[in-house]
Image: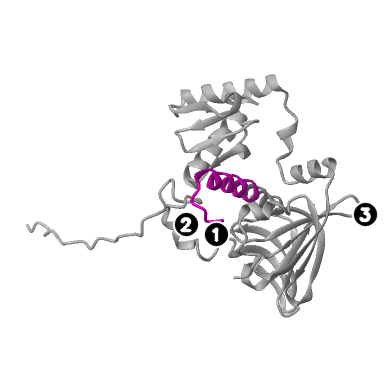
Amino acid sequence: MSEWQRKNPLEWQTYVNKEVKVTAAEKHEYKGWVLTIDPVSANIVLGKLMEDGKISVSVILGHAVKEVEIGNEGDDEMKEQLAHLFMPEESKAYGQEELERRKSSLKTWLETNHIPVTEQGESQRTLCVAGVLMIDPPYGPEDCSSSNEIILSRVQSLIQGHLAAQE
Amino acid sequence: WITPGRVPVSVLRLPRGPDGTSRGFDPNSPRYQALSSSSISTAGSGNRADLEREQQGRVELRERYLRSLFAMAGHTVHFTMYERVNVSASFDASDIDILNFQVSNLQTPLGVHREALLRCSDIISYTFEL
């Protein structure tokens, strides 16, 4: 295992949002802004703005990384852009009231379906289902997280059904 | 009239599936312990606050990575493999340990494969556009 793969998450985090040059196996070189580093595989995700406005994403696999040189740090605008790159579209579009309405509507609906649900986190914004699944704003199927993929898929399809019924 | 005898049926025991809490990075889970030396790195300090901070960092990095895989689904991805092999394919899915990628329409110098699994250990890098 290489030195790069042995780093811990806190060390990897120091690379996020920085411009880097990565030297990989067989002398391949990559430049770009670090979007993230997968803590399981040590894969480095780089983003680069293309001339046509598109974003090119390059990922160097952790086992192939030889050297990483840190360059510039991104400004706030760049950081914001990088942070939202892979995030679901709608997460920015809802106002506070609308979010509250969506939350209580989903909560009521889950309760009518006899699914235990509680509110958690700062200002009770996260819904917690049966203690094993979290639903964050804006409370769509993509906003569920759970380490139990069976429960995850069941609840996601339930929410899908709930949203479809509302339309 | 013969009553059918009670023929013993052999019991097929399936391996135990992951229980609800053992799928992630809980340091006490069998999964973590099986993988810890090879693929999950930690600063390894016993301090609870440090561990908490490290877990938080791991969560943020991992979520972004998983979302990047999600964003890649259905896109054409170019793979740079060892020995100067370059192929492209439409990305479908990955396993949670990032050991294999499942792809469709893999374009190789020898022709197109409708469905294929790529071993991540054979890949140096991959690139796609958003």
Kindly indicate whether the residue at mark 1 contacts the one at mark 3 (C-beta within 8 angstroms): no
In this rendering, would A55 be left or right of A60?
A: right
Q: What residue appears at the point 78 percent right and 75 percent down from the top-left corner?
A: A27
Q: What residue appears at the point 62 percent right and 34 percent down from the top-left corner?
A: A140
**Secondary-structure class at tag 1:** loop
The residue beneath circle 1 is B40
As drawn, the residue found furthest toward the left would be B1
The residue beneath circle 2 is B32
**Secondary-structure class at tag 2:** helix
Q: Earlier in the sequence, mark 2 or mark 1?
A: 2
Q: What residue appears at the point 68 percent right and 59 percent down from the top-left corner?
A: B91
Residue B64, placed above or below residue B77: above
Q: Amino acid at mark 3?
A: Glu
Q: Residues within 10 Å of mark 2 (few under 14, many from 20)?
A: some
Residue B128 visible somewhere in the drawing? yes
Q: CA distance from mark 2 to mark 3?
A: 43 Å
In this rendering, would B79 be left or right of A148?
A: right
Residue A51, numbered label:
3
- Do badges 3 and 1 share one subunit? no
Q: CA distance from mark 2 to mark 1?
A: 8 Å
Identify the magenta region: B41-62
Mark 2 or 3, closer to the camera: 2
